[in-house]
Image (cartoon, rainbow, N blue to C red):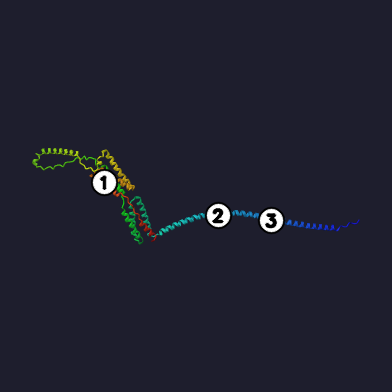
Amino acid sequence: MAAASVPPATAATGRWIAAGGAVLAALSAAALVLAWNAQQRVKSLEGELVKRQQDSGALAAEARLLAGQAQEGARDASAKLALLEARVAETSLQRTQIEELIQSMARSRDENVLADVEAAVRVALQQSAITGSAEPLVAALRQADERLARYSQPRLERVRRAVVQDLDKARAAGATDVPLLGIRLDEVIRLVDELPLLAAVDRRPAVRPATPARPASAAASAAAGWSADWGGRWQAMLDQIWSEARSLVRVTRIDMPEAMLVAPEQAFFLRENLKLRLLNARLALLSRQFDVAQSDLRDAQSALERYFDRSSRRVAGALESVRQISTQARLITVPRPDATLAAIAAAAAGR
């Protein structure tokens, strides 16, 4: 039997299949090649990545080392900077002090004199305000005038004229010598117990003046001895009788009747009250309360005039002392040396 012939459609299909297989084989071969190439590239990339990772780790370690060194360097730099700042501040302070010293040394003699005079005047003004006396201010202005007179600079003439003007004002104000007034008050207080009162009775006997004896001759002296003896006795007896008679009657002019009504036991309290008045006046003077002192002195003077015997020298002396103390115990207003201070300020400013 003869072989059957292959239809043309089947042959075409086989060719297409063969061609497709060839193409598929070619594609598979290409894919394998590409896969092998990709695998090789991946391997090379993995090696590169490992190498770079190792390099990065080394760099990171080195960076950490450098960071530590940089941190230590920064701490050292901060310490050195703080030390430098302290030295700079110290240098600035020393420089300021040196500049002030140079300026102080560079000031002229006139400026030094003006500064010293101003300081002395201000201190004296404070002392005068505290003590209530113009003496500290007068002394300071007098010393300033003498010092300015020694320099004899035309620039300081205006200041000297102002000093002289204020010195005259301070001298005209006067001064209250409080210690001296206190001593005088102490003397009056000490004499109070010895001052006689108007109510006290003077018991001193009145002595009758003796009759001068007539000169006798030598011949009559023996004969007149007996008569002279009896005459002396009679004279002594008459003098005693006369003294007793005068002590019974006393005539006194009384301007203030209440002074005679002071009982002997009240005299002690009267004297103590007077002492307290005088002591209060003394304390008021020491505390610069001149109004209170004047009031106590007026009361003390009134008590002396009313209850004590003004005909006595001691009472008169005590009254005069109280009057003088009352006259001198007055408030003194210390003048301010404004002209001197203004002239010093103008001279220091160069005007």
Q: Alpha-carbon neighbours of circle 3 within 10 Å: few (<14), some, or many (≥20)?
A: few
The secondary element bearing badge 3 is classed as helix
The secondary element bearing badge 1 is classed as helix
Residue 110 in the image: state x and y as whole percent: 37, 59
Residue at numbered disc 3:
45
Q: Is residue 182 left or right of residue 95?
A: left
N-term-proximal mark, 1 vs 2: 2
Question: In the current view of this chain or complex, which residue is farthest to the right?
Answer: 1
Residue at numbered disc 2:
74
Q: Residue at x 55, y 54 (%)?
A: 74
Residue type, mark 3 in image = Leu
Q: Residue at x 69, y 56 (%)?
A: 45
Asked if residue 285 is positioned above or below residue 30 in the image, the reply reads: above
Residue at numbered disc 1:
319
Q: Is residue 65 left or right of residue 245?
A: right
Q: Nearer the viewer, residue 259 or 270?
A: 259
Q: Alpha-carbon neighbours of circle 1 within 10 Å: few (<14), some, or many (≥20)?
A: many
